[in-house]
Amino acid sequence: MPRLIGAVQATQAGTQAQQITTFNSSGTFAAQPKTTDAWVLVVAGGGGGASSTGSGGGAGGHLEVPSHPLPLSPVPVTVGAGGAAGQFDPAGGLEPVTKGQPGNNSVFGAAAPLTAIGGGGGVRGISGTPKAGDPGGSGGGGYRGGNGGTGTPGQGNRGGNASPATAGRGGGGGAGAAGTDVSTPGAEGGATGGAGLSSSITGSPVYRGGGGASPDGTEPLAYFNGGIGGGGNTGLYDPSNPVGPYKTDGTANTGGGGAGGMFIFPYQPTAAIAGTIGGSGTVIVNEPQVDYVDGTSSVWDLRAVFRAVKAGNWTN
């Protein structure tokens, strides 16, 4: 007769359903009772675009972890705002006024947080002098001889390079690709923003983290799109197109970079000269379905206990 061990216990089997939680603003996340790991996406705010034919802003960092351990206690969630846009400066284009501001970081957790880095701002050198784009999750575009700002490894890419100086301004970097470079001497051209990245964390593919476009600097003006995933588009305003289309901000909750503003006098209003703001970020947590069994039933012989322990199914 086999030796017996244990006592009668109640058994409860069940399924904890998958749950997807999206934060479009800061808050607190509390996991379901049976969740130990989850798929997490953290996107930072995009950088703002510069004014006065300055460059586009870089996308906010795109940080995706397929299986991230979750603590038992609730954790703080910070969703980064997009960077402010550079503004028209009647004093002659001084950088503190015309420069796009960096996006703000997004953070999930406290003890070992996941931190996505805000996108780099677009730039404009004083009186047309070369200027490198700002670094960030993805970098802002370079201006008239400047290289694009560097991106954060694993989160984004560099901004577009602008070389030689008369080539124009590079596009803001995206989470999936660098901003477009410009290299034709004398073109004073603009550029598209770098493409963002697609994620299916919510169940269907969605692009986020597109870089901001940089504007054209000569007439007739060309129109440039931001990168797929929320990057801001440049405007188009000259005597033959007096009603636009107008520039767009980086899309909210995508981390898209803002677009650079135009500077073709005397045709466009002052509002057209300013850059556009970067898109705010987001944090998404996808808790998987969990099938569970709580407790063991009846009395067990030692061989059954051994098999259950070996299979990882024994509950103390």
Image (spheres, rainbow, N blue to C red):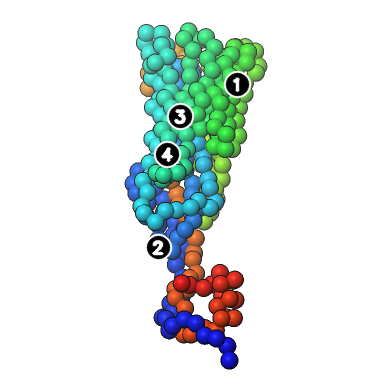
Nearest-to-viewer mark from 4 and 3: 4
Count residues near mark 3 (Cα–Cα under 10 Å), then give few for <14, some for 14-19, many for 20+: many
Residue depicted at x 48% and y 8%: 127
Question: Which residue is the extreme one toward the right?
Answer: 184
| Mark number displayed over residue 106 | 4
Which residue has dot 3 on it? 47
Question: Which residue is the extreme one toward the bottom?
Answer: 1
Q: Could you tell me how far apart the alpha carbons at marks 2 and 3 are, in whole angstroms?
A: 38 Å
Q: Could you tell me how far apart the alpha carbons at marks 2 and 4 are, in whole angstroms?
A: 25 Å
Residue 190 appears in view: no
Q: Toward which corner of the image does residue 222 lie, by quadrant?
A: top right
Which secondary structure lies at badge 3?
Answer: loop
Q: Amino acid at mark 3?
A: Gly
Which secondary structure lies at badge 1?
Answer: loop
Q: Earlier in the sequence, mark 1 or mark 4?
A: 4
Residue depicted at x 56% and y 45%: 198
Q: Taking 29 as reference, is 237 above or below it?
A: above
| Mark number displayed over residue 161 | 1
Q: On the picture, is 173 further left or further right than 111? A: right
Q: Do labels 2 and 4 touch, CB within 8 Å?
A: no
Q: Earlier in the sequence, mark 2 or mark 4?
A: 2
Count residues near mark 4 (Cα–Cα under 10 Å), then give few for <14, some for 14-19, many for 20+: many
Which of the two residues, 285 or 198, is positioned nearer the viewer here?
A: 285
Which of the two residues, 170 or 247, is positioned nearer the viewer here?
A: 170
